[in-house]
Amino acid sequence: MKLKTKVCIAGLMMAAMCGAASAQSLELWAVASAGTAYVVAVAPLSTTGEFVTAILNGNNDLEAIAWKNNTNTRSITRLGSWTGGPLGGSVMFGPDLAVAGISNNRFVTAEINDGGFLELTSFQVNSNGTITLLGNTDTSSVVDTVAITALDAQRVVTVTTDTTQATVTTWIVNSNGSVTAQATPAILQIPSSSVAVAAMSSTQIVVAQNNGNNPHTGMLNVLTLTSLSVASNGALAQESVLYSAQYGNATGPPRMSVASLGGGALAVDCMDDGGYPILNFWNISASGLITLLSSSQNYDNPATTLSVANMGGYAFTIDNAEATPNLYETAVWGQSQGTYQMLAGSTVGGCTNYCYWGTAAAAALEGEVATATTGSSTLFVEVWLFLP
């Protein structure tokens, strides 16, 4: 990936800026670290500047940690944490783990437990920063992958996959924190090895999958986008399906991420069939029609993990590059001269071993982005700021 600015990190991610800043720059605003982590997810909380990470820790357990971004001091404060039971998978290629923030500083994790079943857990971050477990739902569904998005102040949507299909479910988080399915799930007859979901509004979502079978051409490993409407009672109705270009068969860490950029724009970050990240921008109409706006050129290096987040209407991406094994690459993308282009980029290091075997996640804050990465099996959290 062609980078305009560079951030050098030494030791335990202590930041030192290197080189002159361009007119548009992406700044590493603050950094913090925690203990051992192998799989990460991150989501904003409703209190400004606060966010939460959900991780597979060194004991193979689910752990949630709350953080606060201190804008005035350019620092991140670790608040409370909570540790639960074991998750499935291995520490190298752990289970899918997802998290979504809803109202009143509550958040919901969606995880695959050590029995292979989907599990949803709701929490609240209290005013003193401690995390309280509110409710837990063990389902009877054995799943391979899971993704989650917040739909509104008290609802989330999950997408799970098995060997034959994807299941889309609307869940309501009740006032006591219990999590219950709101309506009969929608079934997408598209097998996939990677899945992502984004809420375009409180009444519409888009599901992204790979490894679907294009019924028109028979081609496997295609990017498949499905738009669905969501009724107030949680009922889901498929609006349209689009089969795009051929992409690689993802194994191990997640290789697909989506983010709503507002105004019907959707960013989809995924792997091509050579393992190179590629970023697509789509328009999702109110009726669910899916139209390609722009497709970026492939990044310069293959990667094993990637994530995209809304950064004030821009698309923020993070991936770990095979050619630079001790670095993560970040970039901001926006509209320029009628198409989406990379506006600024940076690199961040700190892995004494290979970032290439780590995972990364990103989530929107107020005009900024929080990221979580697993460099050298250590959890690092960062806040990024884009100066347009």
Image (cartoon, rainbow, N blue to C red):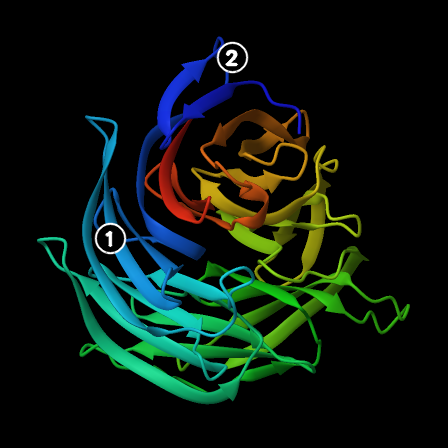
Residue at the top extreme, as displayed: 20
When the figure is inspected, residue 299 is found, relative to residue 20, above or below; the finding is below
When the figure is inspected, residue 241 is found, relative to residue 137, above or below; the finding is above
Q: Position of residue 155 (x, y in %)?
A: 35, 71
Locate residue 127 relative to residue 263 in the image: left or right.
left
The secondary element bearing badge 1 is classed as strand
> For the residue carrying disc 2, how many other residues have a C-alpha within 10 Å: few (<14), some (14-19), or many (20+)?
few
Locate residue 33 relative to residue 245 in the image: left or right.
left
Residue where numbered disc 2 is placed = 22
Residue 134 in which image quadrant: bottom left
344, 253: nearer the viewer? 253
Q: Residue at x 36, y 24 (%)?
A: 15
334, 30: nearer the viewer? 30
Q: Position of residue 121 (x, y in %)?
A: 32, 74
Q: Which mark is residue 314?
A: none
Q: Are marks 2 and 1 in contact (CB under 8 Å)?
A: no
> For the residue carrying disc 1, how many other residues have a C-alpha within 10 Å: few (<14), some (14-19), or many (20+)?
many
When the figure is inspected, residue 220 is found, relative to residue 339, above or below; the finding is below
Residue where numbered disc 1 is placed = 66
Q: Residue at x 44, y 45 (%)?
A: 373
Q: Position of residue 42 (x, y in %)?
A: 39, 53
The residue under label 1 is which amino acid type?
Ala
The residue under label 2 is which amino acid type?
Ser
Picture mark count: 2
The secondary element bearing badge 2 is classed as loop
Q: Residue at x 55, y 34 (%)?
A: 326
Q: Is residue 2 visible?
A: yes
Nearest to viewer (mark 2 / mark 1): 1
